């Protein structure tokens, strides 16, 4: 009863009992067994397989693409500053498995620290690398290889 005791202790006990009940309900839900067809209807197995294969192809492509870009920096960018920024991007791509942040602002800061240049250079190179990346990736997905002579 709310009249007994202090208000703080009453609401604390109510909150504790609510949390206990919620935990018990969730535990019962996880233990609940269902028919195999019922479980499979909730999943989209084809989409999961497609996503896995896409991620594998993307991982392979990033390795090939970043190595190719690094080897051809001089042919891709004439300016020393643009090459510094491109080198920073390629370094990020090569270490993408170690990256724990996916915030655009934080990535720009990392690239700015690596290249020691202003954002205007970063944006210009980012746009050109993006076009190059998607063009080459679509070719790689379609044919399984990259004709590198087309891009220099």
Image (tube, rainbow, N blue to C red):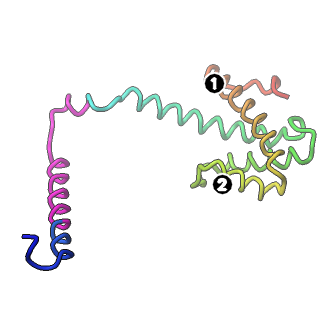
Vertical relation: 144 (above or below) 90: above
- In screen coordinates, is 52 left or right of 113? left
Q: Residue at x 19, y 69 (%)?
A: 11
Quadrant in which the C terminus appears: top right
State the count of labels: 2
Q: Is residue 18 magenta?
A: yes
Q: Secondary structure at mark 2?
A: helix
Q: Is residue 75 above or below residue 135?
A: below
44, above or below 97, in the image: above
| Occupied quadrant, residue 60 | top right
Q: Residue furthest front?
A: 3
On residue 106, the disc is 2
Q: Gap in Å between the C-alphas at discs 1 and 2? A: 33 Å
Q: Main secondary structure of the magenta part?
A: helix
Residue 34 in the image: state x and y as whole percent: 15, 37
Please identify the quadrant where the N terminus is shown.
Answer: bottom left
Question: Mark 2 Cα within 10 Å, few/some/many (few <14, many 20+)?
Answer: few
Determine contact: label 1, label 2, CB under 8 Å: no
Q: Residue 2, image x and y in percent?
A: 10, 70
Task: Name the secondary structure under disc 1.
Answer: loop
- Residue at mark 1: 144
Q: Observer-nearest residue: 78 or 66?
A: 78
Q: Which of the two residues, 124 or 98, is positioned nearer the viewer here?
A: 124
* Magenta stretch bounds: 15-40
The magenta stretch spans residue 25:
yes
């Amino acid at each position: 009863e709310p009249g007994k005791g202090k208000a703080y202790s009453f609401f604390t006990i109510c909150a504790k009992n609510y949390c206990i009940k919620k935990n018990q309900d969730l535990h019962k839900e996880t233990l609940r067994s269902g028919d195999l067809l019922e479980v499979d209807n909730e999943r989209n197995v084809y989409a999961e397989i497609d996503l896995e294969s896409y991620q594998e192809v993307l991982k392979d492509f990033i390795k090939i693409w970043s190595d190719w870009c690094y080897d051809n920096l001089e042919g891709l960018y004439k300016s020393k500053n643009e090459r510094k920024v491109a080198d920073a991007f390629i370094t990020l791509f090569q270490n993408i498995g170690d990256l724990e942040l996916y915030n655009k602002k934080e990535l720009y800061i990392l690239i700015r620290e690596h290249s020691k240049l202003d954002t205007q250079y970063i944006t210009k190179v980012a746009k050109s690398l993006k076009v190059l990346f998607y063009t080459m990736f679509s070719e790689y997905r379609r044919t399984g290889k990259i004709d590198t002579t087309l891009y220099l």
